[in-house]
Amino acid sequence: HQTSQKSTEAITFTPAPLKVRARPLRVLDFDIENRPLTYLGSDFTTAEVTAIAWAWADQPQDVTVYLLGETELSEILHMFRTAYEHADLITGHYIIGHDLPMVNGALVELGMPVLPDKMVSDTKIHFVRSKGISLSQESLGAMLRLDHQKVVMNQSKWRAANRLTPAGLAEVRQRVVGDVQQHLQLRGELVARGYLCPPKLWKSGSGKPDLAYTP
């Protein structure tokens, strides 16, 4: 009986270097203004979007703004949604509780596609746990001594703005642009000081047929 012995040869494999091109996150900072529209019951009123402003975090001086009275609401919403879709992260102050649902409601009313789910950094909702201080954007800006100040409007100016008069539109333009400019600086300060929790996924709630109806 003859036994044959096979020799084994080691095979080496050197993979080609993998090149990964990383890019910074595209962060979109935005704010809206709205006016009372109809009575829903008692003194509770529904609202309508009257202005939207936004800027990319890496281009803080380039603020885009659209105003109802100068542009049709459907066009305003379309332009904002386009910018929103190109963002990796959306940021603003109390946008989870107000701005994002308001925009979604306006899109629904006009029969337009709603906002897709997106990572969101909300400087009020995602602020660290705290007590004894105001978390309004104006108060936080004052506490942190930001360069950009909140644009204050009295009742007379708001009435003119809500009536879409030329003078009122000029006021609300300054207000909504100023909010975005201040918030860009605010979020930067909060992140630098460790006062802001990580971003979280905001779900628009569309396409959920398994949800039970609650009257």
Image (cartoon, rainbow, N blue to C red):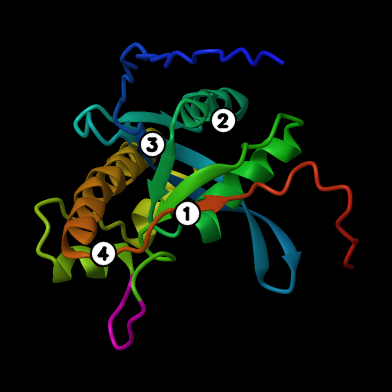
Foreground residue among 22 and 31: 22
Q: CA distance from mark 1 to mark 3?
A: 13 Å
Q: Secondary structure at mark 4?
A: helix
User: 10 Å neighbourhood of mark 2: few (<14), some, or many (≥20)?
Assistant: many
- Residue at image point 14% right, 51% down: 148
Mark 1 vs 2: CB contact within 8 A: no
- Residue 138 is tagged as 4
- The answer to the question of whether label 2 and label 4 lie on touching residues, with beta carbons closer than 8 A, is no
Can residue 12 be seen?
yes
149 part of magenta stretch: no
Q: CA distance from mark 1 to mark 4?
A: 15 Å
Residue beneath disc 2: 77
How far apart are the two marked residues, 3 and 2, measured between alpha carbons? 11 Å
Q: Magenta residues, as a range?
A: 129-135
Q: Residue placed farthest to the bottom in the image?
A: 132
Camera-near label (1 vs 3) is 1
Disc assigned to residue 95: 1
Q: Which mark is residue 182?
A: none
Cα–Cα span, label 4 and label 3: 17 Å
Which comes sooner in the sequence, label 1 or label 4?
1
Is 39 left or right of 117, judged from the image as shown? right
Residue 200 placement (x, y as % from top left): 48, 54
* Amino acid found under the numbered disc labelled 2: Leu
